[in-house]
């Protein structure tokens, strides 16, 4: 029997990359439950839309009746849970949606998963997995000489976003410990690649550099993030789903720490190279702006557990991944035009005007 995966948040950046990759590389069927917030975009999934192995359902993970009905109808062997409010800056301006989706939504989804799983037969129960996609931000901030986060680093979330993800991680842990639900949690560092909503650092800088607009760098630009190509993240999730031990958490990252300013300079150079003729480097557009409140200084992931136990390692180098990514945004003007209207423009105007 072909396995069905219920993916939540599959119209977002990582979820849509995951669905396309899995449908290409596996024979699984996918049911994609997504609320289509500002971050959800069905254009990302155009190539899967007509497949008999794919179904899109417009809805909220917190809609108990809908989720119950989907689970009973499709009888998935796994739930891969991406759905979340994911932007730190938005969580600082208004945490309520983050509490509603990341905490209450995950809680409702877990409860429906538990109820569905309890009614499966013994062998189906043993095979079922609930994979929760989380973030390195739950661990807080590192000093310059601190070792990278491991799976045993104590949680110390600093933004409303990180706190809401930490709460959801704890709920997932509790559902395994208390009820035996076969859960897996992945904590990943910053992703980059196609389909990322362009209010996050990398796509924002590519599009602003192309348009000759200011490149707004928060604070001194020395905050460090550990960047991973999104397709490597998707392979890691598939690997954990297949081989991970229920109840365990796995750190995922790129062993690729870079200060923000270096990323922005690199993007400026690549846009200069790919769209020549501006007369002067795009680096001149770099503008230091007011820092993000509570801005975590440094993230870095120790990924030796997933490497040792499951044999996953990132394949893409940062040099080739960032080049592909810049080219993708430059070549997909239709996609960019479609997502940079209405609410996007409003966010950019409000956020960068203060
Ligand atoms: P995203 O913001 O691009 O996409 C989120 C998706 O979830 C959107 O399609 C949105 O419509 C959907 N959604 C939001 N609320 C929903 C709800 N209540 N019910 C159903 N769908 C809902 O996010 P992303 O960057 O793709 O991140 C996906 C997951 O990975 C998140 O859980 C995030 O915390 C985690 N993560 C992201 C990164 C990163 O660098 N982007 C790194 C580590 C972990
Ligand atoms: O670490 C994983 C996290 O990475 C995920 O859990 C989040 O969902 C994802 O959004 C991302 O969070 P960040 O806050 O790190 O991503 P963002 O792209 O918003 O910012 C990356 C860095 O760049 C951060 O230090 C803030 C800085 N920045 C961001 C923007 C949007 C700027 O300097 N200028 C900007 O305009």
Image (cartoon, helix red, strand yellow):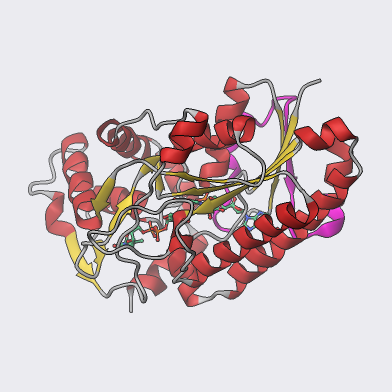
Identified at 49% across, 54% down, the residue is 135
Q: Quadrant of the N terminus?
A: top right
Q: Where is residue 117 shown, x and y percent of the image?
A: 84, 44
Identified at 12% across, 40% down, the residue is 277
User: Residue reaching furthest bottom?
Assistant: 354
Identified at 30% across, 32% down, the residue is 317
- Numbered range of the magenta stretch: 38-67
Q: From the viewer's perspective, is residue 343 above or below residue 290?
A: above
* Apparent side of residue 208 relative to residue 272 in the rendered image (left or right): right
- Reply yes or no: does residue 58 show up in magenta: yes
Identified at 38% across, 49% down, the residue is 301
Count of numbered tags: 0
- Reply yes or no: does residue 312 show up in magenta: no
Residue 278's quadrant in the figure?
top left
Residue 319's quadrant in the figure?
top left
* Apparent side of residue 32 relative to residue 65 in the rendered image (left or right): left
Q: Where is residue 11 shown, x and y percent of the image?
A: 60, 45
Q: Where is residue 290 shown, x and y percent of the image?
A: 27, 75
* Apparent side of residue 316 relative to residue 3 in the rendered image (left or right): left
Q: Where is residue 219 shown, x and y percent of the image?
A: 23, 70
User: Residue reaching furthest left?
Assistant: 280
Q: Is residue 197 something that shows in the picture?
A: yes
Q: Is residue 231 something that shows in the picture?
A: no
Q: Quadrant of the C terminus?
A: bottom left
Q: Nearer the viewer, residue 54 or 248?
A: 248
């Amino acid at each position: 029997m072909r396995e069905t995966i219920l993916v939540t948040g599959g119209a977002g950046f990582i979820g849509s990359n995951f669905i396309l990759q899995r449908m290409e590389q596996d024979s699984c069927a996918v049911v994609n439950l997504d609320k289509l917030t500002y971050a959800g975009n069905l254009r990302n999934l155009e190539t899967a839309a007509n497949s008999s192995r794919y179904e899109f359902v417009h809805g909220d993970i917190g809609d108990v009746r809908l989720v119950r009905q989907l689970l009973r109808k499709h009888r998935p062997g796994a739930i891969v849970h991406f759905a979340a409010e994911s932007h730190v800056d938005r969580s600082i301006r208004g945490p309520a949606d983050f509490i509603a989706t990341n905490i209450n939504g995950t809680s409702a989804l877990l409860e429906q998963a538990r109820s569905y799983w309890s009614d499966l037969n013994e062998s189906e129960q043993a095979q079922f997995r609930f994979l929760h996609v989380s973030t390195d931000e739950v661990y807080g901030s590192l000093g310059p000489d601190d070792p990278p986060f491991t799976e045993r680093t104590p949680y110390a979330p600093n933004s409303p976003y990180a706190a809401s993800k930490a709460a959801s991680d704890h709920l997932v842990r509790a559902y395994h410990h208390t009820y035996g639900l076969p859960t897996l949690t992945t904590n990943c560092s910053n992703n980059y690649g196609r389909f990322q909503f362009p209010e996050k650092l990398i796509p924002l800088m590519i599009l602003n550099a192309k348009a000759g607009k200011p490149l707004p760098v928060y604070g001194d630009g020395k905050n460090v993030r550990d960047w991973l190509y999104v397709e490597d993240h998707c392979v890691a999730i598939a690997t954990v789903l297949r081989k991970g031990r229920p109840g365990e958490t796995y750190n995922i990252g790129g062993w690729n720490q870079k200060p923000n300013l270096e990323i922005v300079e690199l993007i400026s150079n690549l846009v200069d190279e790919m769209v020549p003729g501006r007369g002067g480097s795009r680096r001149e557009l770099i503008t230091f702006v007011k820092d993000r409140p509570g801005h975590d200084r440094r993230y870095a992931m120790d990924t030796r557990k997933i490497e040792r136990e499951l044999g996953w390692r990132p394949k893409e180098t940062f040099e080739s991944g960032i080049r592909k990514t810049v080219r993708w945004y430059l070549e997909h003007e239709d996609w960019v035009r479609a997502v940079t209207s209405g609410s996007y423009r409003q966010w950019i105007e409000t956020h960068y005007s203060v």
